[in-house]
Image (spheres, coloured by chain):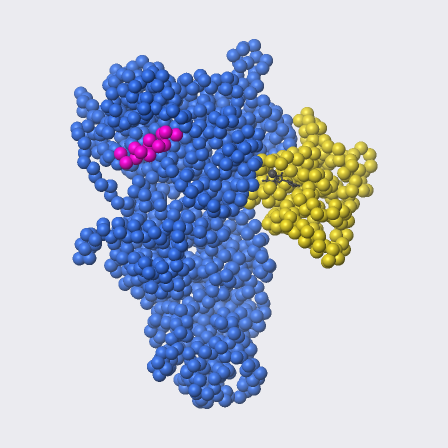
Chain colours: A blue, B yellow
Amino acid sequence: MYAIGDKYIVPALKEHARRKFKRYTTEEEMTVSELMEHGFDQAVKLVYTTPPNYRPLRNLVVKIAFKYQAILVSSESFLEAIESTPAFRRDLFLFRLTETSSNAMFNLSSLVQKAQQFIDPTLSPLNPGSDRRPSKATLFRSQFRLPASQNPLQEITAELTLAPHHTQRGPQNEGSRGEKDGTRVQGNHYVGKLHLSEQYLLFSTQGSSFLNTASLSASSAFTGQTHGAGPAGNGFILPLCAIRRVERLPTHSYMFALAITTWNGSGDGKGKGSGSSGGQKLTIQMAGSRQQCERFCDGLKKGLREGVKEVENLRAVVSECYSEFLLSELSDEKGGPENHDSGMREPPDTGLGKIYKYPGNVRKLRDATKMRLWREEMKENGRNATLVRQPTFHKLIRVGLPNRLRGEIWELTSGSFFERLQNPKLFEETLKKYEGRESLAIDEIEKDLNRSLPEYPGFQEEEGIGRLRRVLTAYSWINPDVGYCQAMNIVVAALLIYMSESQAFFLLSVLCNTLLPGYYSQTMYGTLLDQRVFESLVEKTMPILWEHLVRSDIQLSVVSLPWFLSLYINSMPLIFAFRVLDVFFLEGPKVLFQIGLAILRINGEELLDATDDGTFISILKSYFSRLDESAHPNSENPKLRAVTRFQELMVVAFKEFTGITQNTISEQRAKHKDAVLDSIESFAKRTSIRNLGPESKRLSSNDLGFIYDRFYGVLYERQQRLQTIQAEADRKTKNARTKATEVVTGVPSNTVETGRVGLGPSATQMDYDTFREFLAGITRWAVTDSPSTPLQDSQSEKQHSYFGNSLKGRPVNLSPWGAGPEPTDHEFMKRLFQKWDKDNTGALTLQNVVAGFAQVKGTKDIMSNISYFFELYDDDGDGKVDREGILRISEALLFLSRRGFERSLSSSPSMNDLQTQVSSETREGRRENRDEQFLSSVSAFIRRCFEYADPDQQRTEGEVKEAAAGIDNFSIGDDEDDLLDLGNNEKPTSPKKSQSPQTPRPNQAAANAALDPNNPLFITLPTFRMVILADEVLENFFDSAFSNSFKLFDPSIPSSTSLSANLTTFSNAGAPGRGSNVTLPVGGASAGVAAPGKGIRGMLDNIVSDGMRVAAEVRRRMDEAQRELDRAATGRDEDSEDEHDDLRTPRGKGDPETRSVMDTDRELLEGAETADVGVSKPVENLMDREIGAPAPVAESTKGEELFER
Amino acid sequence: MADTGAASAPKPSSSVKLVLLGEAAVGKSSLVMRFVNNDFQENKEPTIGAAFLTQKISLSTRTIKFEIWDTAGQERFASLAPMYYRNAQAALVVYDITKPSSFTKAQHWVSELQRQASPNIVIAVVGNKADLASNDPPPSTSAPISDGDGIVAVPTDGGEGELEDEEETIRKVPVRTAKAYADEEKALFFETSAKTGHNVAEVFTAIANQIPETALKGPRGAGGAQTQRTEERGRVDLGVRESGAKEGCAC
Ligand SMILES: Nc1nc2c(ncn2[C@@H]2O[C@H](COP(=O)(O)OP(=O)(O)OP(=O)(O)O)[C@@H](O)[C@H]2O)c(=O)[nH]1
Ligand SMILES: [Mg+2]
């Protein structure tokens, strides 16, 4: 019944809420009280009662929460809201994980930016998809260079017929099939596939299929062999909003035929008697069943209706294209009356070249001729958005673009035009949004502004420098992972000669995202990878040269790296580099390889004489400087003499190396990817370990390496896992997306492998949950006793702690733990975490962890180990641990020992002594005895502690209550001198002297005495030390067992292959399904399960849990006593209780009688499950994220025609 | 010095691979340009990947041809560095005396080299842009440095304190700190200015003198015309500046 109610409320609510929340996301900062005043906590709950498919609202709330996390965690009511809303908790967690994979600097503001970046697309109704896509989508987008929002919705085999003249109308059915080389006799026919995406209608002669039913191989049937046509082949990529009219033609056959009239043809005006001026018309015959055809048409109709909304965008974007000006000027010449008012007077910005001259000699470049040819081409085949690609198009590109059209064609062929169409104002808005902000990237950019193409006059003045600054800065904001990389300045400077700032901005973004994947990333893995690929191609295609290079120890990549990184721009004279770019933007990255190979091939003979790097480089330098000379200066044939070296280069590149396709590149990338990433990672590891600071010196380099591997391994695994969960939640996704991306680029998509150091910025901080998992991999005690079954994982995944750093609230963590042992949760672990988290950031850096281990393992000194432990429990650092603390210590000792110290103890000499003392036949027998012994030692510990504890300052009854109220924090520790005496005498202040030191366990009376809240007491470090040293078992524990319980690098472990793999790079350690359990000593993952009936092992566990029960019992009594006191003291002591509760967390709420680690976990699990009842399942939610945009409102259909505007 | 006892007759020529490392824009390329072409440019394009140049230097007993690898300084290019310092016999680790961060980065490079590069690599720590700290009286930088131990003895606290106060805003890495560090790492130390040319040739000469005779390989291959060409182009008169430098290598 709620559901029904919701249905009616929601539309109103969401509007209201969205309006209201918008405020929060604006720049003004709010305080927590303000937020609460606005009822943010209530809002959270409310929003999460709406049906989960109203994603944007939830996103908004999450975004706000994230933005204000620092202050919100201090609000009880907000924490309560989190606790009562598991779905919210999960969203926060997901959001955080997706967003925090930031740079080493954990910078909240940058997180927020990323957050916005993450959220905005989902908020936009134009982008119903987010980053989870159907399997073939990546291939589809890659072939057509479409924005990420596009998916293949429909496809059908079809034949495209192009009217030979735009004045002629109607289909040219009798056209000469096969004459595809531009003869305009009767129109051209192309057979290919017609595709439909959300916003595009596409036709390509590259007949690949992207249907869901198509196998992956069918969809990658496109081999990359483009023969100069580029991946999109011949055909068109029409934004639906550029289609003016679609008619179904009457055909004699059963087939469907559509006539499509595009936006062009009547200037840029609209509705001036549509089609009357002979608009560009395409005819398409569909070849498919009637049903298929109808389905396609329905989809098209729907898309066209949606497209209406974008006409304005298109208008704006197109107005920046020079072709519009060119053609309208043309119409003006003709005196077309309808163009007088709408024609553009001011030519659009075609780059700095317009002001400072384009490089090269205009006459020599035959710019005017090229321009004329292009004008013809566009008159017939459409321009910018509506351009239909026929073979002439590709040929015109091969011969070099005319200056003023260069920018525009780059934009079209690279696909950045479509990005701009999608978000025309992004550049300006980004600049505005971040105006006045500073960043590291900006500093770096500033350093290089004067150092970018300094010989070009435009960059000697503020005009050019300013443009460069704005483009680079804006890009560094929208892609903070890349930020700024040297070489980008050179590339962008070059682009700016031919295009506007906004155009260059989008083109840069396409470069970084798809054309040069990973080139400019933090680790530059893409650059390194492609160098490896290039080398291997040289080896394949020019084995003799390759062998020579190897023999002479000349490292090729040293020469070729700048070629790729700056797209030949500062290797060749500019005019030639631009010719390379012309082809590169059309045909893709393979062009860089083809050119590079051709350079080597042409200079091959000379290079074979070079025996050192210097000679090698200077040969190529001089070659580049003579590219404009004749390739055959001595030839008789004047035509041959006229061929320049550059022309020769192009011919060799595209004829001789025509076999180098996108597929070749992808395959090679896939082949070398791991080696390259490994080497980057081992470099990163070395560097990172070296810079860890002085504390790290206390650990062996093996240990450091091990910690590094585990640290990043766990972070990586967790990210991977999270992604898997997300992927699984979306049925469409499965694994194909990973594959698809890799098939296309050969470079792992960054989203798929985030966390891998080699790929760039990844998480560098460990929250508490990750820390637990980390510990579980290296200690036995941190492994849970009651692992949740894998089946529950997806259920309980929402139980992740939200901000990870908040120890308030309930850190219930039953996320799937992957293949490794599932960690338990214990107060001790939390304390350790807090202690290591020196800066109180709520997360540990590698440095924190190393420093932590340096303290735990770096000292072989028992005294410092004891004080370390003591300090862990000395919350306020006053040198005293109170009754509560003593109990906690004993609990921790039992916790740590509950699985024994098998390996560590037996390997320590002192324990060997112990073993000989313990009469023992079998190993198990020894263990059993040891465990029992430990238990009794802990009991004795508690007893002695209370025995030797100092009474707190207040000895008179009158002050007792105060003391109980937590005043002991302020007591003055003047009792140390007494200690020696006290060691021998009964404590005078102990009210009951009935405790007997000989009792192996504290009996009731003793416990009561110790726990009497009327008798506040504390121990100091010297007391603690004495008590420890009084017991051999405990002494041994502190001497070695504790620090040995952390298993770091252990060369003594028999040469298990998986382990040694573990030590080399973390990528191995982090391999899913391996990793953690190999590092777990002896028991392995199974040790986590304490099966009660499991022989001796079970018995031992029983003993241990007995021990735990003792401690629990002690605590229960104490609690009881406390409660009694509370009743008497009218709750004056609440403050101190709260404090304890915070630290104690899960235990505080359980039933003390049955409390054991196992039980607590159970409870929490159950609690978690029940908490979820009535809340949407996570799986659904994850899907909502993808498809959750509000359904478009249907508009009334129009007329008989399929579409008309 | 290793080379003093070496053969006397026609000076043997040998090549030495030298790599320049250091933070972006500290002036690595400028140092090389000063050394190779005796030239300085205000606006130099950042180095992409690495640049390669050669320069010969004539010592009393032999001629050394430096094959210089000038690397890119931006942090993210660091992972490319192993490609360039591979087999290097000498390294110039450059920092900018006005940028403390660049000194830290230099220290990282030194330890990277010590662990990863060829075991006998000769390292020089070079503080560039010394011209900016113009308040340094010329002798106080150059003289003590080339004297090796002298620098440690120089300062009465008062005197140097004054000096540091004056230039406080410009110089951020004290000579003493850097020198002490270099000594500890058994590296050469110089302060240079690519702009004025101060100490530039001295660095290279000192390095050349440090290269043990045994580590030298002959000129690679038959060379041919190409090699000749570069060598001639790169030749620079080092005769004058060469003299004062030998003390630089206090080993
Ligand atoms: N005042 C002064 N400026 C210098 C000196 N050396 C270099 N510069 C300037 O510092 C800037 C950077 O010089 P580069 O030589 O390009 O620096 P780099 O270390 O090669 O930089 P990357 O190639 O980016 O790593 C240029 O503007 C130089 O003019 C110097 O000795 N004194
Ligand atoms: Mg440089």
Residue at left 25%, top 15%?
Answer: A174
Q: Is residue B34 left or right of residue A486?
A: right
> Which is nearer the eye, A348 or A1122?
A348
Q: How many marks?
A: 0
Q: Position of residue A1061 (x, y in %)?
A: 50, 51
Q: Is residue A1036 above or below residue A592?
A: below
Q: Position of residue A1035 (x, y in %)?
A: 54, 74
For the stretch drawn in magenta, the main secondary structure is helix
From this viewpoint, which residue is outermost toward the front? A341
Residue at left 59%, top 69%?
Answer: A861
Q: Is residue A267 above or below residue A765?
A: above
Q: Is residue A676 left or right of residue A50?
A: right
Residue A936 can be seen in this image: no
**Quarter location, residue B117:** top right
State yes or no: residue A317 in magenta: yes
Image quarter of the C terminus of chain A: top left
**Quarter location, residue A163:** top left
Q: Which residues are magenta?
A: A308-320
Residue A435 can be seen in this image: yes
Residue at left 46%, top 32%?
Answer: A589
> Which is nearer the eye, A247 or A609?
A247
Image quarter of the N terminus of chain A: bottom left
Q: Position of residue B163 (x, y in %)?
A: 71, 52
> Which is nearer the eye, A1028 or A204?
A204
Q: Position of residue A437 (x, y in %)?
A: 47, 47
